[in-house]
Image: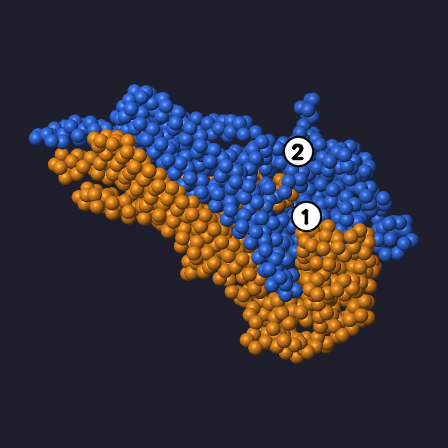
Amino acid sequence: MMIKTLGVHIRGFVRESVMTPIFMILEVIMEMLIPILMAMMIDNGINGDSENKMGYILMIGGLMIICAALALFSGAMGAIYGAKASAGFARNLRQAMFERIQTFSFANIDKYSTAGLVTRMTTDVTNLQNAYQMILRICFRAPVTLIVATTMTMIINLRLASVYLIAVSFLSVILVFVLKKTRRYFTQVFEKYDELNASVQENVSSIRVVKAFVREDYENKKFNRAANNLYRLFVRAEKMIVSVSPVMMLTMYASIIAISWFGANMIVGGDLTTGELTSMLTYCMNILMSLMMLAFIFVMITMSLASAKRIEGVLNEQSTLTNPENPDFEVKDGSIDFENVYFSYNETAEKPVLNNISLSIKSGETIGIIGGTGSSKTSLVNLIGRLYDVTGGCVRVGGKDVRTYDLETLRDEVSVVLQKNVLFSGTIYDNLRWGNENATEEECRRACELACADEFISAFPDGYNTKIEQGGTNVSGGQKQRICIARALLKKPKILILDDSTSAVDTATDARIRKAFANEIPNTTKIIISQRISSVENADRIIVMDDGCISGVGTHEELVKSNAIYSEIYAAQTGGSGDFDRKGEA
Amino acid sequence: MAKPMGRDKTKPLPKVENPMKTLKRLLAIIFKKYKFHMLVVMLTIFAGVFANVQGTLFIQTLIDDYITPMIGQPNPDFTPLLLAIARVAAFYLFGAAATYAQARIMIYVTQGTMRDLRIQIFNHMESLPIKYFDTHPHGDIMSVYTNDVDTLRQMVSQSMVQLFSSAITIVSVTASMFVLSVPLTLLTIAIVFVMMFVTKTLASKSGKYFLAQQTDLGKENGYIEEMMNGQKVVKVFNHEKKSVEEFRELNEKLFDSSYNANKFANILMPVNARLGDVGYVICAIVGSALAIFGVTGLTLGKLVSFLSFNKNFTTPINQVSQQFNSIVMALAGAERIFNLLDEKSEEDNGYVTLVNAERKNGKLTETEERTGLWAWKHVHQATGEVEYKELRGALVMDDVDFGYSDDKMVLHNIDIYAEPGQKIAFVGSTGAGKTTITNLINRFYDIQDGKIRYDGININKIKKSDLRRSLGIVLQDTHLFTDTIMENIRYGRLDATDDEVIAAAKLANADSFIRKLPDGYNTVIKGDGGNLSQGQRQMLAIARAAVADPPALILDEATSSIDTRTEKMVQESMDKLMKGRTTFVIAHRLSTVKNSDCIMVLEHGRVIERGTHDQLLEQKGKYYQLYTGKTA
């Protein structure tokens, strides 16, 4: 399953992925010829009794250089192809993950943290890139060495070769056993290791809390415990790995001794030449080295398995929202209907977040929504643009169930200014054009005027070409919110939703924005969530949310009289603007 | 054998400021704790090399000395061979045992050193002043744990041992080669120089691309981070296709540099190995010529031995050149670790401590139990006399100047008089210095000039931990820990019972939403509470401060994300809790500060107005302006 998910991403680099092992195998074969030639040079050349010693040595030397050159060529080609195949694999994985994440719904996004996704796309992919390169370059080499060397020994002398067969099968059994265990141990190690780093991260970002509560010792103790735990796990895992080496060495030595002894007997008996014995001993080394290589690769792969799993998780994550099969591409108007809507983020939650909501909003109406923290105001409006799907009931926009529309069409017509909003690095123009790629400068300016953003943008030395830094850190909260509103306006939506989008804007400017909306875009349905009475009191109707239910709907005057929650909020906020220090930013 | 977590090939070789000093310090750390271990390891390395040499010698002499004499003999005597085999078997056993012992010991040394360093770094980090965290990117601090400690692993566990054994091998082989033939040895050394030169050239080439790869990776990282952060905005604006295209461009660049970097790094190995082969051939040919023509006294027998040494010579050199990278990486990591360890800890010269107290016959006495009554225990340094002074919460700032750096003051001549039990509020625009003042009260930062007194005691004399314990604090950004909600609240006071925790949650109005969560109080918060709303997190932070039951409280925009209605309920309970305790409040919402005993209006680091709500309105100054939106 995992191999299939990840395997398709070598596409475009199949040739490289095939050529790498082929070249690596060629290299191995050349490499294995070299010791034979070396032996020949010594036995028949230097120690030989031919007439033309020098000539023979030069000939063998020449052959060796040719072999070395071929080995170099295939080694280098293998290196280049291997680098390309693995870098390409990594590129494809990153691209695929990024594209997959773009299909995520809000519910999918909620599942992952930003940091988690970044790690998956960087560190984890790099791990796999390295592992893939290893596999291509060494994984084939080692078994081929093993096979070639074993074959060669069998050709030289079948009876002596049986020594290897016994040694290799013995070692394989041990290796498989140990590696299985190691794999389990290392999985545990890495889990603990991640946890440890996560807790460090927490301590770094929450250092003020730690210090304010004088919890340094407590955190130290916690960390020391975790570090010791990790140490124990690491030691256990590594001990397991280390235990392989004496077994390996002893087997190798035992083989050498056995071959020496039996070989000597055979030479004396005339069944074997001395040169053959030398080659046998060289192959002995080759075989055992390749076994060790295999073991090493196995450990490497085991360790990148955790990364592979995390990447696979993202790639296999199915969007919880899908486009309907024959979608509607037109939204008739900005009317909204909620019919017995139930909603919860989590199927197992005891209590739904929205509980049997029914509500009708006419096209062009201005609706205010107010209510306590956690009263589900945001959840309610998120259903309109189908950012989440209802759990029960149905939401209709322009008279049709939102689930029948093409998602892109729907979201173009339902423009949400999110509570947790973001600007991206780039100029103000760039940011505004998120709303409409082809917006002219004039249109951008117009939208900004409506959102009362033009006044401060024009005052910037670079005006609309001012660069916004990552996360919009170089504009104030209130300015950011106004640019975000302008950006949403550029979509020319039929429904505009402001989710607490003017909380950092001072009251007077807030009022001006609302006035501009009323005058300039009267046909757009406007939904305004706010904690401020002043932001909603002039709305056509105000919805008071309480604990996932609608507690009251009506005009400001009606609600002040009839709704306890509303009148309470009103009482709490009267007497002043309710907002202080942001004033200076207007 | 295996080396899990090898060098991360995606990183360029970093610069090390002071390699020798760093290396010395690192070795000192290892050798100090593991002196005995390292001694044994060195012995085992010697033993290993020795056994290995014996093994090689055995194979070399096997044919000539033991087998050839037996060929053609009617009754060959196998005894010498048997004896030789027995001897070499003993050496092999000895060598294997030594290698195993060495590997086992090195696990303890490596992992032990890493653990010790981790603990040392963490414990030291916890002792660093807030300033350190404010002035260093958190990513850099994290990287010390995640990257730098890890790079040490390979160096300690492999490179050190390898270098040592390679050095022994190289020295002994060189010596033997010189004995056999001086000209051939010089020839071999010349070839090694060629290998080193090639290594250097290729390494610098790949280094260049590794650097490019690092830059590209950084750019791509930044883009991913930005997009993942704004993923919901991307969805809302149907911007998916466009961001995929932008990403593709960055991704192609990264592919290119990564491919090239790895290409050159990969080529190094085969090139060096083949150069070694070529060197072997050259030596063989030159040696044969020398032997055949009888120059320099080289015999054929000596040549054969020489050639086997030649092979034994280039192998360790290849190994060393491969270890070189990991050593440079490790030293760069070690240097960053040491930089962190060398940061100065928060200084604390305070000697006045905070103790539980009870009143007996009108006199304050110290007690173990939590009485709700606190006293400052002041041991006079001159006389050793102990004085108890009730903690009342009077806080005075007298002409305080402060700047985060000495050349730029952000607070000027601040005077504050908070009577016990008063609620003092700070208002003013962003950047006026409100949060800075609270940073001074709990001594996250120390003032440049002036005095701060707590119940008449200069806060510099109070032990920092006790000062902070006396002040409950709820910060603007709520930070929660990966643990259950129960434990997160209990963080305020570790010995609080479950009931006390729940009572605190109720007080902060958090109980009802906590109970709605799938596991209630046992719900595990992950990733700094990302699954809770900002307002809910603030409520948890308030509960955490409430369970601490502190004598005084600092609320820095503690309710800014809680809606007014809920805030009102929280506020009421907080007011109850804070009755009789000094409270400092920073808020931009009027309802939060209106009922304060004294409101300070700050502007550009100065207090420009002070008084009660009504007094300030009467003054028709800045406060009036902020409050009514009118200019007087």
Expressed as whole percent of the image width and height from the top left, the position of residue A106 reads 59, 63
The residue lying at 77 percent from left, 37 percent from top is B408
On whether disc 2 and disc 1 are found on a single subunit, the reply is: yes
Displayed quadrant of residue A404: bottom right
Q: Nearer the viewer, residue B265 or B526?
A: B265
Q: Which chain is orange in the picture? A: A
Q: Which chain is blue in the picture? A: B
Task: Determine whether B608 is above or below A457 in the image.
Answer: above
Q: Nearer the viewer, residue A355 or B180?
A: B180
Q: Nearer the viewer, residue B302 or B467?
A: B302
Q: Which is nearer the N-term, disc 2 or disc 1?
A: 2
Direction from residue B175 to residue B415 in the image, left or right: right
Q: Which residue is mark 1?
A: B474
Q: Which residue is mark 2?
A: B463
| Residue A200 shows in the view | no
Judge depth for marks 2 and 1 and give the one in front. 1
Crowdedness near tag 2: few (<14), some (14–19) or many (≥20) residues, C-alpha within 10 Å: some
Task: Determine whether B46 is above or below B575 in the image.
Answer: above
Chain to which the residue tagged by mark 1 belongs: B
Label 1: which secondary element: strand
Direction from residue B65 to residue A374 in the image, left or right: right
Q: CA distance from mark 2 to mark 1?
A: 21 Å
Callout 2 amino acid: Lys
The dot on residue A356 is none
